[in-house]
Amino acid sequence: MTDNRNLYRLLPKVDELLEEVDIKRLLASIPRRLVVDSIREELDILRRDIGRLSLNREQVLDRKNNLVKSVVDRAHNKDLPKLRRVVNATGTVIHTNIGRSLIGEKVMENIEDIAMNYSNLEYDLEKGIRGSRYSHLEDILVKITGGEAAMVVNNNAAAVMLVLSTLAKDKEVIVSRGELIEIGGSFRIPDVMEQSGARLVSVGTTNKTHLEDFERAITEDTKVLLKVHTSNYRILGFTSSVSAEELSPLSSKYDIPLVEDLGSGVLVDLSKYGLEYEPTVQDSIASGVDVVTFSGDKLLGGPQAGIIVGKREYIEAMKKNPLTRAFRVDKFTISALEATLRLYLDEETAVKNIPTLNMLSLTVDEIGKKAQRLYDILINAMEYKGLNLNIVDDYSQVGGGSLPLEKLPTKCIRISSETIGISELERGLREFKIPIIARVYRDDLYIDLRTVREEEYKIIAEGLKYSVGKIGGIVT
């Protein structure tokens, strides 16, 4: 039986390891605290394994010889930020789990300028007195959407809550049963309404709601007629719903504001680019809606934000609501959103420079050329023995709860193997220094070029080599 006490004596002390050349080099770039923690953790693992696995002297010495490398690897992993850049090879353009919409280069220039300098966030340069942070976005939102006034909060759920709290606290809000949606993360319209203090009155049925259902439900306590765009699902078949255009005369007849939550904010007609028509904010305002809420980080292609546009009297009341301070946006959001909105002053410029719109509007031929370039890099740069690569037709998704039925024709590089486990290959890509998020279907791995940028081709090539090597494949 092995004498564990003698084996434990073989292990170096923390101070001894700190004197190793590679550890000293590590200390030049990584905080000492992280390095010491890594040393202690690796020693703890080795001590545990001596007892648990009954290691012999040779095995302990072998592990000891690799201890410095293990410490270096652990310290580098500890030093990585928790929020990290990844490569989106899934083809889902607005991928909620990996950051939704990308910020374009022109927008980043504006963020950098504001972030690295003082700004007139709440200072009126013309009058030389304190100003309002909402003023920086209001004019351009009014110009683009056609609303009378506008304001911005930190996300669309907050926007809906603020609207209902301001217009209908302790009063009734009428909404179709077919529009009581779940926004995401189990955050539901009824929950938002409850937190706002408004009382929900649902009318119609799940699949059919008529105008008379709304009118019959109106009482003296009714303060809002609410329409919610079901952007993240569709009810098909025997259905009917009441449009904002139909509700507008009813709203005027009873002098009750009509509010529409569009969810994903769209400022251009996507049907021009081969996608399903999605109601634009401009359409909603033109149809007579009094207040419209929508997201800044979905189809609009900007930062996370909840945008409210509509009649001035209602917007001004919201600005005075105490919740506004809790929901307010910071200078980074304002600078990113303003720069994004400025691109919308010219639609062609917006489609070219806003990554979300650009990815959604790519043709199959354009994606095919991207796929061929990446394929050539993967094939010519190195030989992945055991892997079969080919370009195939497939479909991308919009994502982010937007256009749920839309299937976007795309081109993918499909990777299959009879000797290497695809699930292990996918895990290796995720564990690369810049994680690569691909999709697996029927034991094949797919890299969808719709969401892969040209500067990421080299990362994918290196990540694939890393993953194959990690699982014991042969890379030459």
Image: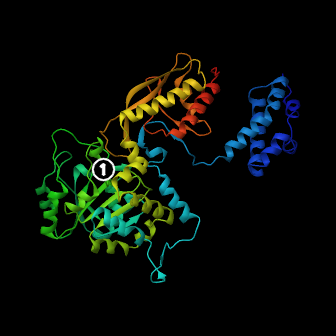
- Measuring 43% from the left and 65% from the top, which residue is drawn there? 327
- Which residue extends farthest top? 418
- In the picture, residue 342 is in which quadrant? bottom left
> Which quadrant holds residue 465?
top right
- Residue tagged by mark 1? 181
Q: Secondary structure at mark 1?
A: loop
User: Residue 162, can we see it?
Assistant: yes
| Mark 1: few/some/many CA within 10 Å (<14, 14-19, 20+) | some
Vertical placement of residue 243 versus 68, above or below: below
Quadrant placement of the N terminus: top right
Q: Residue at x 32, y 60 (%)?
A: 293
Determine the residue positioned at 59% across, 18% down. 385
- Work out whether 119 lies above or below 365: below
Q: Is residue 47 visible?
A: no
Classify the position of the C terminus by image quarter. top right
Direction from residue 120 to residue 401 in the image, left or right = left
Residue 32 placement, left or right of 258:
right
**Residue type indicated by callout 1:** Ile
